[in-house]
Image (tube, rainbow, N blue to C red):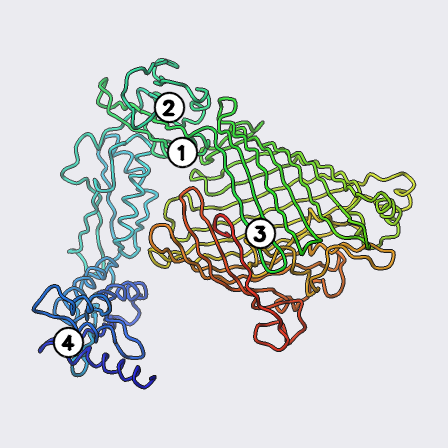
């Protein structure tokens, strides 16, 4: 069978040339060789540019030297008919061959001469030879540079007495074109753009790069060129005129579908600024504070763009459009019309996801309510709840709950003056309640319930650094929290308190009532809002300083001498989404989180530390099943003699990586293939056993899994079902950790049902 397949491939490959009509030759690509007349001429940039000129047309693809798709096309293509079964097979399974012809040679030579001229080499000769055997031909280009690259000898900008002429003369001092430097067509284009950008920021509203032209005089010298900047012949006084803003009209509730209907009122703010509206959804001062331009000022494209970004980043308006129209009062005046389309101010969102396997099941759900304009000044109030529940067998369960309310007040940073390049500055306050609850059999007939509560209040500043809003900073200098633990067994609580002074590992401190101060700073880069960036990227870096104090009975506090523990947290998350083809995306994520002990007797609570596994982590393993390190999965709560040991599968260091290939299938469906790897550990300073601690051999302790996922896009949210199997298990002995090795154990599939992409 294999021999038959190989024979058919070879036959179809041969057919790619045998069945070519008489006189036709298969195009096999082109090569280029540069031949400068001078030995020391700098031609590296030119050679790289010339290589791009011969990329097209692309030759027919081959596999192991064969072109089976071209062969199929030649066998089935019917030149006498446009339709029919044979042509359908040829177009569906074959590929039309790329044929060598004189048009390719002419195209290459023309482009190479133009490229050489763009790099200053105006005297060029191109010699092309066609080489090959039988019906396969290659092109060999030799580009002879007969003269060195031209260098700029003189640079002349308009120097007339007009305001525009004087300004151009001033801008010449900072020109990108320098005397004595090589001529570059690319720099001419960049200089035109620089000039018009500068002039449009100073009032020349209608001026564009197309209105300017550089003329090069190369007749006086073999190596020098004189460059002169001129206006094109069709440029009128309108492009050369400088414009001021005479009136600003703001439409704060603009609806494109009902624009121009009756019932709107006009309300003047001053002699040249007015609002036109049916309803005023936002306080006027909020809009006025975000306008970067004013009446009587010259038009500035920089201020126009800054205003757009500021109004959009308020989070209240869905669309912002600013149109400039020539005023009827004078030829040099503009009217600015600001159209603002609000979003729905209130929004309710819900999500749910599930996980299930042969020995456990669980769910995750969330609910959030958003009000974008709470007090009429674009105040953003968000109240959200997120809960996770996992049931192991029939006796163990974990439940976590986060309730958070945050209020963002735009333009409220005391003593902070908003710079022109900032898109938004705001004050943010939030309140949080966290619950960590787990239940375990304790002894023969007792169920132990432990719940850890954390109440937290936070206040700080939030600002978007650049106009596009892709860079965000968040500083929270105020953060105070109260954390306490509740047991359903009073005797156990008393036992823990009495044991605190003798606990050298500081493990029991997680159950002691604590007061914490946690100032934090976060930096976020996210360029996905720019539409279609070449490299859609999300990067988040967060730092937290955690100082604690304990509330204990006086006699126990004196005996323990706990002091004031101090910890430092750092969290890094990097994600990128590469568009390989129109419907194919490669997404990957790298995450690193760690908590460091900065003082003696510092300890961590389960709410502070990290876990791994589940629908958005290493999907081949259930949540809280991996780590720390190579520790075996075991019960959450066990007793060792008279001691209580809580095994939460948590650690103070986490590594996580995922890669996912997403293929869109039609309009709503998406197929994904993925691979995840990660684990958690304890650092030596944080305690933990030898098997739980981070070492230089950490890469052999990563849990990993691979699988397939199917997603369905419902516009508002995405349904996701992932099926994954474990590839490596860190808790297995060396030599048995990877699938296929002896005593590897079960590789039963893990199902994860969730909403949205995993990252």
What percent of the width, then of the height, locates residue 710?
A: 44, 56
- The earlier-in-sequence mark between 3 and 2 is 2
Q: Please name the residue that numbered disc 3 is placed on.
A: 572
Q: Please name the residue that numbered disc 2 is placed on.
A: 253
Q: Secondary structure at mark 3?
A: strand
Q: Please name the residue that numbered disc 1 is placed on.
A: 306
Q: In the rendered structure, are the residues bearing label 4 and label 1 in contact, judged by CB atoms less than 8 Å apart?
A: no
What percent of the width, then of the height, locates residue 45?
A: 31, 63
- Whole-number angstrom distance, CA of label 2 to CA of label 1: 21 Å
92 relative to 666, above or below: below
Residue 312 placement: quadrant: top left
- Whole-number angstrom distance, CA of label 3 to CA of label 4: 56 Å
Name the front one of labels 2 and 1: 2
- Whole-number angstrom distance, CA of label 1 to CA of label 3: 30 Å
Q: Residues within 10 Å of mark 4 (few under 14, many from 20)?
A: many
- The earlier-in-sequence mark between 3 and 4 is 4
Quadrant of the image for the N terminus?
Answer: bottom left
Q: Residue at x 60, y 55 (%)?
A: 592
Residue 284 placement: quadrant: top left
What percent of the width, then of the height, locates residue 128?
A: 16, 73
Q: In the rendered structure, are the residues bearing label 2 and label 1 in contact, judged by CB atoms less than 8 Å apart?
A: no
What percent of the width, then of the height, locates residue 259?
A: 29, 24
Q: Residues within 10 Å of mark 2 (few under 14, many from 20)?
A: many
Q: Residues within 10 Å of mark 3 (few under 14, many from 20)?
A: some
For this view, does 663 lie left or right of residue 70? Answer: right
Res. 25 mark: 4
Query: For this rendering, which residue is in front, 130 or 552?
Result: 552
- The earlier-in-sequence mark between 1 and 3 is 1
Q: Residue at x 38, y 14 (%)?
A: 270
């Amino acid at each position: 069978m294999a021999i038959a397949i190989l024979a058919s491939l070879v036959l179809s490959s041969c057919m790619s040339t045998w069945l070519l009509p008489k006189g036709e030759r298969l195009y096999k690509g082109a090569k280029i060789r540069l031949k400068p007349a001078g030995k020391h001429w700098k031609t590296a940039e030119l050679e790289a540019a010339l290589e791009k000129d011969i990329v097209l047309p692309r030759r027919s693809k081959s596999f192991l030297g064969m072109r089976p798709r071209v062969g199929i096309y030649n066998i089935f293509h019917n030149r006498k008919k446009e339709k029919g079964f044979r042509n359908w097979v040829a177009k569906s399974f074959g590929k039309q061959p790329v044929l060598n012809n004189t048009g390719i040679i002419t195209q290459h030579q023309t482009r190479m001469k133009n490229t050489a001229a763009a790099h200053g080499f105006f005297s060029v000769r191109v010699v092309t030879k066609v080489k090959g055997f039988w019906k396969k031909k290659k092109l060999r280009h030799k580009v002879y540079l007969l003269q060195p690259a031209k260098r700029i000898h003189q640079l002349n900008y308009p120097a007339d007495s007009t305001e525009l002429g004087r300004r151009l003369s001033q801008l010449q001092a900072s020109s990108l074109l320098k005397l004595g430097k090589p001529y570059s067509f690319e720099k001419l284009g960049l200089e035109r753009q620089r000039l018009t950008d500068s002039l449009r920021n100073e009032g020349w509203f209608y001026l564009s790069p197309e209105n300017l032209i550089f003329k090069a005089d190369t007749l006086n010298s073999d190596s020098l060129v004189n460059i002169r900047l001129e206006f094109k012949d069709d440029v009128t006084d309108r492009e050369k005129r400088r414009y001021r803003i005479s009136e600003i009209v703001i439409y704060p509730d603009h609806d494109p579908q009902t624009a121009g209907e009756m019932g709107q009122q006009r309300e003047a703010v001053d002699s040249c600024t007015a609002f036109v509206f049916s309803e005023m959804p936002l306080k006027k001062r909020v809009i006025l504070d975000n306008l970067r331009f004013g009446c009587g000022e010259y038009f500035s494209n920089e201020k126009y763009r800054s205003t757009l970004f500021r109004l959009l980043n308020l989070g209240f308006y869905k669309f912002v459009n600013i149109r400039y129209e020539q005023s009827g009062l004078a030829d040099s005046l503009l009217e600015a019309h600001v159209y603002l389309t609000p979003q729905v101010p209130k929004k309710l969102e819900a999500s749910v996801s599930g996980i299930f396997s042969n020995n456990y099941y669980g769910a995750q759900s969330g609910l959030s309510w958003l009000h974008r304009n709470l007090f009429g000044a674009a105040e953003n109030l968000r109240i959200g709840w997120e809960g996770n529940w996992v049931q192991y067998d029939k006796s163990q369960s974990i439940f976590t709950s986060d309730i958070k309310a945050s209020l963002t007040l735009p333009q409220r940073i005391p003593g902070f003056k908003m710079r022109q390049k900032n898109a938004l500055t705001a004050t943010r306050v939030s309140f949080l309640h966290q619950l960590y609850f787990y239940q375990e059999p304790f002894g023969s007939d007792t169920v132990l319930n432990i719940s850890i509560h954390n109440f937290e209040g936070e206040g700080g500043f939030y600002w978007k650094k650049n106009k596009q809003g892709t860079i965000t900073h968040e500083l929270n200098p105020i953060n105070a929290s109260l954390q306490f633990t509740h047991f359903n067994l009073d005797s156990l609580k008393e036992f823990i308190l009495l044991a605190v002074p003798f606990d050298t590992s500081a493990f029991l401190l997680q159950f002691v009532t604590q007061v914490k101060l946690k100032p934090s700073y976060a930096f976020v880069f996210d360029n996905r809002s720019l539409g279609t960036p070449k490299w859609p990227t999300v990067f988040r870096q967060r730092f937290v300083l955690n100082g604690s104090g304990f509330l204990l009975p006086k006699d126990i506090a004196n005996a323990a001498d706990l002091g004031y523990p101090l910890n430092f947290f750092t969290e890094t998350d990097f994600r990128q989404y590469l568009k390989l083809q129109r419907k194919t995306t490669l997404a990957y994520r790298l995450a690193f989180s760690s908590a460091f002990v900065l003082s003696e007797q510092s300890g961590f609570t389960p709410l502070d530390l990290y876990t791994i596994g589940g629908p958005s982590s290493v999907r081949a393993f259930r949540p809280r099943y991996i780590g720390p390190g190579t520790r075996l999965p075991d019960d959450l709560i066990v007793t060792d003699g008279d001691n209580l040991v809580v095994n939460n599968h948590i650690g103070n260091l986490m590594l996580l990586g995922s890669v996912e290939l997403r293929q869109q299938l039609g309009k709503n469906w998406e197929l994904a293939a993925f691979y995840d790897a990660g684990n958690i550990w304890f650092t030596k300073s944080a305690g933990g056993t030898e098997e739980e601690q981070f070492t230089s051999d950490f890469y052999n302790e990563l849990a990993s899994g691979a699988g397939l996922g199917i997603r369905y896009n419902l516009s508002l949210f995405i349904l996701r079902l992932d099926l994954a199997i474990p590839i490596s298990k860190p808790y297995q002995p060396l030599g048995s950790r990877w699938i296929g090795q002896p005593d590897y154990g079960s590789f039963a599939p893990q199902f994860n049902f969730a909403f949205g992409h995993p990252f």
